[in-house]
Image (cartoon, rainbow, N blue to C red):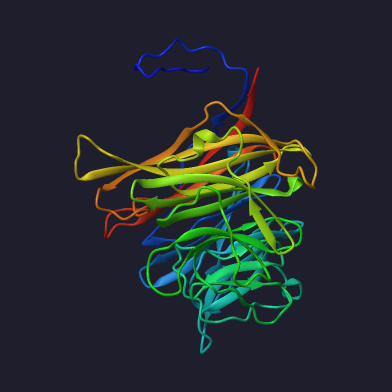
Amino acid sequence: NVNKCGTDHTCAKPTPYHGLAIAPEGALESVLTADDIGYPTLIADNTNFYLGVWTHTATASNIEIRKFPEVPSTGGAKTDLNALLPGLFEQYGSSPGMAVAGLFRLRLLFAGDPIGMPPMGMHLIDIDETPLQLAPPAQQPKVDPGLVGYDTKPRGPVPRLLTSDWGLWVQNEKLIFFDGKTPVAAPAFGARRVLGFAPMVGLFGPYAVLETAPLVGQGNEATELWALGNMAGLASLTGDEAGTRRGVTVAPFPEAYVNIVSWAFEGPKGHSLKTNVAGCLGMVCQAVGAVDGAESLDNLPAAFPEACSAKVSMTERDFGESFQITLANPDKPAVATTVLLGSVLRVKSLADAGADAGTLETTTLNPPGFAIASSEGPVSAAAGEILGPTSIAMTSNDHIMVAWVERAAQGQAHVLKTRRFVVKRCP
């Protein structure tokens, strides 16, 4: 049904809805608890979701791996790196970047501190999906990133695998690129401090959108487009404003050679969420403003967006996004409620690559925004300390999973939770 309410607080009688809709699927699930939990990396293939997350309890850290079939009733599987790599690492420093590396195989890029003298650094391993186990030694990646000194907080920007070979991460507030071939990864951008990033697709590459700040001092933070080989020049996003960065995410549309970029910042008027369409070619990236038909998402007082996409046809993709809005509680002045919301759009490309690339047509699903979770905390809590980090993924069959961390009061365990949705057509 469609429920319409007016500004006078009166609502019309619900009417039948015909078209694309979003619906809950299965029950909310508590996946694990720990003293601290990092960013939940979540990816999907044609039929499964895969989750990798850093955890810390007492004095020990670990990286947990979960496999969720897209249909909730068919069960799942789990393992962890302490079990797969016994006696090899003293501690782990990040959630993993993950990519499908072949038939029934996952590749993980993560920060680990090996037993003995080597300090914390970046490493690659391959894991078989069925069952979840370490791939044979002869089939492991041939070249490790080989860069030590990883120092990014586990809740911060995690390593990302753009493909099964290419990786990006932030270290010493510099963007690092690993091509899967060179024995030691190298800084790819250092003209400004890098606070966060999200990979983009394009022709050639690699590409990413960066949250940046000056090398010295505070202020003048920005969200900008980066291409490898352009060490200093970044392209601006349309509508970006001064303010503290509050998250950036990218949902790729490779069939149209573009990306839908969402980012947030906190300025004098509070949080603001923005969207752009952006494309990259060679060493040049360009943004062309908000997505037509998605104006309802632009300028929301929201933070920490996360996005995903899944192919529907050669010209269509579904795009899912989650974001946070924190609200005052009129009945509890010392309490704030953070609500995790979601939205899904179907986007169609109206042109091939070339001068008209990036011309998109959007269809909004019913409802245009839906609640995923909410959590209460002290009104004095810093942004992101009540709920999050969050991740979202979508299979090619339009099943959606959202994973997030609900942060408890000091001295209590945090909880990693998941919830599922599905895109369907109402007759």
Instruction: Report the label total.
Output: 0
Question: Which residue is painted at 34% across and 46% down in the image?
Answer: 269
Q: Where residue 272 appears, x then y in whole percent?
A: 42, 45
- Report the residue that reaches farthest toward the top: 13
Residue 205 in view, yes or no: yes
Q: Where residue 360 appears, x then y in whole percent?
A: 69, 37
Q: Quadrant of the C terminus?
A: top right
Work out whether 150 lies above or below 266.
below
Work out whether 251 lies above or below 63.
above
Q: Is residue 341 left or right of residue 162?
A: left
Residue 31 in view, yes or no: no
Work out whether 396 lies above or below 208.
above
Q: Nearer the viewer, residue 123 or 180?
A: 180
Q: Nearer the viewer, residue 385 or 275?
A: 275
Q: Nearer the viewer, residue 400 or 310?
A: 310
Question: Which residue is painted at 42% across and 17% down in the image?
Answer: 5
Q: Is residue 268 left or right of residue 210?
A: left
Q: Where residue 131 appears, x then y in whole percent?
A: 67, 57
Q: Where residue 15 appears, x then y in whole percent?
A: 52, 12
Q: Is residue 367 left or right of residue 377?
A: right
